[in-house]
Image (spheres, rainbow, N blue to C red):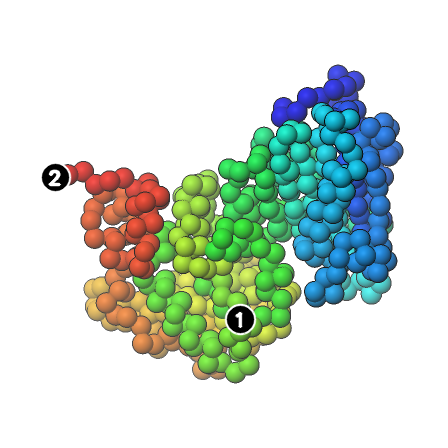
C-alpha cells in the first residue's frame, strides 16, 4: 500500500460501500473536504453513515445557488456549471482552503484531499438523463504535490433518486481507490463499478495527473474504459489527454475515417486530405464547425487476439504526432457509429473509407442480429443524409482501378447499392495519387518487422523518424549485410 493504514485490522475486506467508507474513516491520516453540486450530498452521506467520519471530514458543502457558487468558485465564461472547468475550480479552491486553514505543524502526517462533483440529474420530461463531472485532488505523502483523478459520467437510470444513490457509491469508490488502489490504475478504474452495474452509469472520460501518475498514459486509460465495457467510445487529442466526446462533437459537422493505422500511411493521409476538401464543399458545412476524427474499432485492435496495449499506443503516438483527434469505439457496424454521432449533433456527417470497408457495409452477415436485417441498418445509416466518400483500389493483376462504377457487390445487394449510389450518397474520391495505391499498412508492418528497407517512403513525412526514434511496432536497427 502507498500509505499507512491505521485501524485497518478492524475493517472487513469485503468491498461493500459502507466498508470502503469506514476504512477511509478509520485511517486517521486521511482528511479533507467534500463539495457536491447538483445531486445532493450523496457521497459524503456514505461517510457520515459509516461512522468515524469526524476523522475524515473537515467540511462538507453544496453551493446550489448559482450566485453563491460564483462567489465561491468564480464565474464561468460560458455560463454553464456542469463542466470540467467548474469541477477543477472547485477542487483548487477547496484544497487551497484546507492548506490555508489547517496548520502543517499541527497535522504533520495528514494526507489532505478535496472531493468534488458537479452534476445534472434527469430532467422532469425524462428526455435528458443527466451527466456529471466527478473528481478528487489528493496527497499520498504530506511532502508530495497533489494528484488528480477527474472523470465524466452519463447516467442511464430514469429516476433522480436512483441516480443520486449511484453517484454516492461512485464517489466512495473513487475516494477509496485514490488512497488504496493508486499503485494499480487499471484496477482502480475497474473498482469504480464496485457495487454498481454497467446499466446504471457510463464513464466516458478520465484523466490521471500528479506525481503518483507520472507514468500513466491517459490514452491507455481511455482504452480501458472501452475494453471494460464502461463506455462505447472514447477520444483523445494530439497532446495525448483524453477528451469528452459529447463536448468535442456537440453541434459539429463530422467527418470520420476508420482504419487500422498500423502504421498510418500515405494512403491514409491522401484519403484524409481529399475527403476533407470534398466535405468542406458540401452545403451547410462550415470548416470552423467541423470535427475530423480518425477512428479505430476495438475489433480492429483485437484482430490478432488479445489487445496489445503497446501496439495500440504505437498507433496513437503516430496519429497524435500528425495533430489528429483519435476515437476508439466498440462499434463494428458503421450505422452504430453514426447513431452515436447523432446523439450530439444534427449537422452534416460523412464517412471516408476504402473499397474493402464499403464491401463490408453491403455484406448481409453483419446485420443478422437485426430484426430488419440490412434494410434496418441502412435506414439508420443514411437517414441523416449521410455521405460516403470512397477511396479507390488498384487491382494489381489487371491494373484496373476499382471505384463505385465497377465495384462488385453480392447479387442480392445490387439494387440496394444502385439506389444509394444514384441518390448521391456514395461519392468517389477523385484526384487521388495513383503512385501510392500499392501501399498497405500490413506491408509496411512486415517490412519493419523483418528489417527491410524502403518502408520509410510509404509513410507521411516525419512518421518514419518517429518510428525509428521511439522504436515503435517492434522496430530494431537493421543488421549490416
Residue 29 lies in quadrant: top right
Residue in the image at 27% along x and 58% along y:
458
Mark 2 = which residue? 481
| Residue 330 showing in the rendered view | no
Q: Earlier in the sequence, mark 2 or mark 1?
A: 1
Q: Quadrant of the N terminus?
A: top right
Q: Tell me where residue 412 appears, x and y as whole percent.
A: 44, 70
Residue in the image at 85% along x and 27% along y:
52
Indicate left or right for 164 with 301 as reference.
right
Name the outermost residue toward the left.
Answer: 481
The circle on residue 162 is: none
Mark 1 = which residue? 290
Q: Tell me where residue 150 appears, x and y as whole percent.
A: 65, 46
Indicate left or right for 116 with 209 as reference.
right
> Does 180 appear above or below 224?
above
> Does 53 appear above or below 440?
above
Q: What's the distance in space between the residues labelled 2 and 1, CA to CA? A: 50 Å
| Residue 53 showing in the rendered view | yes
Residue in the image at 78% along x and 34% along y:
102
Residue 354 lies in quadrant: bottom left
Q: Tell me where residue 238 appears, x and y as whole percent.
A: 48, 56
Residue 469 lies in quadrant: top left
Q: Categorize mark 1 by other alpha carbons within 10 Å: few (<14), some (14-19), many (20+).
A: many
Q: Categorize mark 2 by other alpha carbons within 10 Å: few (<14), some (14-19), many (20+).
A: few
- The one of 339 and 86 positioned closer to us in this rendering: 86
Judged from the image, the secondary structure of the residue bearing numbered disc 2 is: loop
Q: Tell me where residue 82 appears, x and y as whole percent.
A: 73, 57
Residue in the image at 59% along x and 59% along y:
245
Amino acid at each position: 500500500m502507498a500509505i499507512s493504514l491505521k485501524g485497518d485490522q478492524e475493517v472487513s475486506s469485503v468491498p461493500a460501500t459502507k466498508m470502503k467508507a469506514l476504512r477511509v474513516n478509520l485511517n486517521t491520516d486521511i482528511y479533507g473536504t467534500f463539495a457536491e453540486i447538483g445531486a445532493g450530498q450523496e457521497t459524503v452521506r456514505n461517510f457520515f453513515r459509516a461512522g468515524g467520519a469526524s476523522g475524515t471530514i473537515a467540511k462538507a458543502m453544496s453551493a446550489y445557488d448559482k450566485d453563491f457558487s460564483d462567489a465561491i468558485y468564480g464565474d464561468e465564461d460560458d455560463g454553464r456549471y456542469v463542466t470540467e472547468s467548474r469541477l477543477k475550480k472547485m477542487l483548487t479552491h477547496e484544497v487551497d482552503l484546507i492548506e490555508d486553514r489547517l496548520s502543517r505543524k499541527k497535522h504533520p502526517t495528514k494526507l489532505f484531499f478535496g472531493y468534488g462533483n458537479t452534476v445534472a440529474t434527469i430532467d422532469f420530461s425524462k428526455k435528458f438523463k443527466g451527466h456529471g463531472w466527478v473528481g478528487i485532488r489528493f496527497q499520498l505523502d504530506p511532502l508530495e504535490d497533489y494528484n488528480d483523478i477527474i472523470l465524466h459520467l452519463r447516467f442511464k437510470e430514469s429516476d433522480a433518486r436512483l441516480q443520486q444513490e449511484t453517484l454516492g457509491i461512485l464517489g466512495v469508490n473513487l475516494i477509496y481507490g485514490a488512497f488504496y488502489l493508486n499503485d494499480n490504475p487499471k484496477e482502480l478504474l475497474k473498482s469504480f463499478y464496485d457495487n454498481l452495474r454497467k446499466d446504471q452509469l457510463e464513464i466516458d472520460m478520465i484523466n490521471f495527473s500528479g506525481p503518483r501518475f507520472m507514468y500513466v498514459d491517459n490514452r491507455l486509460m481511455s482504452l480501458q474504459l472501452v475494453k471494460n465495457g464502461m463506455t462505447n467510445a472514447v477520444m483523445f487529442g494530439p497532446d495525448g489527454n483524453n477528451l469528452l466526446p459529447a463536448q468535442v462533437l456537440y453541434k459539429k459537422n463530422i467527418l470520420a475515417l476508420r482504419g487500422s493505422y498500423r502504421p498510418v500511411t500515405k494512403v491514409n493521409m491522401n484519403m484524409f486530405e481529399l475527403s476533407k476538401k470534398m466535405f468542406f464543399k458540401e452545403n451547410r458545412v462550415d470548416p470552423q464547425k467541423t470535427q475530423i476524427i480518425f477512428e479505430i474499432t476495438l475489433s480492429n485492435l483485437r484482430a490478432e487476439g488479445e489487445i496489445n496495449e503497446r501496439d495500440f499506443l504505437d498507433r496513437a503516438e503516430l496519429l497524435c504526432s500528425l495533430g489528429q483527434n483519435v476515437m476508439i469505439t466498440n462499434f463494428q457496424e458503421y450505422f452504430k457509429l453514426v447513431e452515436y454521432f447523432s446523439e450530439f449533433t444534427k449537422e452534416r456527417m460523412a464517412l471516408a473509407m476504402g473499397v474493402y470497408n464499403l464491401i463490408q457495409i453491403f455484406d448481409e452477415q453483419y446485420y443478422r442480429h437485426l430484426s430488419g436485417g440490412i434494410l434496418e441498418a441502412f435506414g439508420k445509416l443514411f437517414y441523416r443524409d449521410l455521405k460516403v466518400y470512397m477511396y479507390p483500389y488498384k487491382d494489381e493483376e489487371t491494373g484496373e482501378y476499382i471505384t463505385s462504377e465497377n465495384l462488385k457487390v453480392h447479387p442480392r445487394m445490387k439494387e440496394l447499392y444502385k439506389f444509394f449510389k444514384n441518390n448521391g450518397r456514395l461519392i468517389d474520391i477523385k484526384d487521388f495519387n495513383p503512385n501510392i495505391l500499392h501501399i498497405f499498412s500490413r506491408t509496411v508492418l512486415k517490412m519493419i518487422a523483418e528489417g527491410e528497407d524502403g518502408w520509410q517512403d510509404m509513410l507521411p513525412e516525419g512518421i518514419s523518424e518517429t518510428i525509428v526514434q521511439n522504436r515503435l511496432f517492434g522496430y530494431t536497427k537493421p543488421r549490416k549485410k
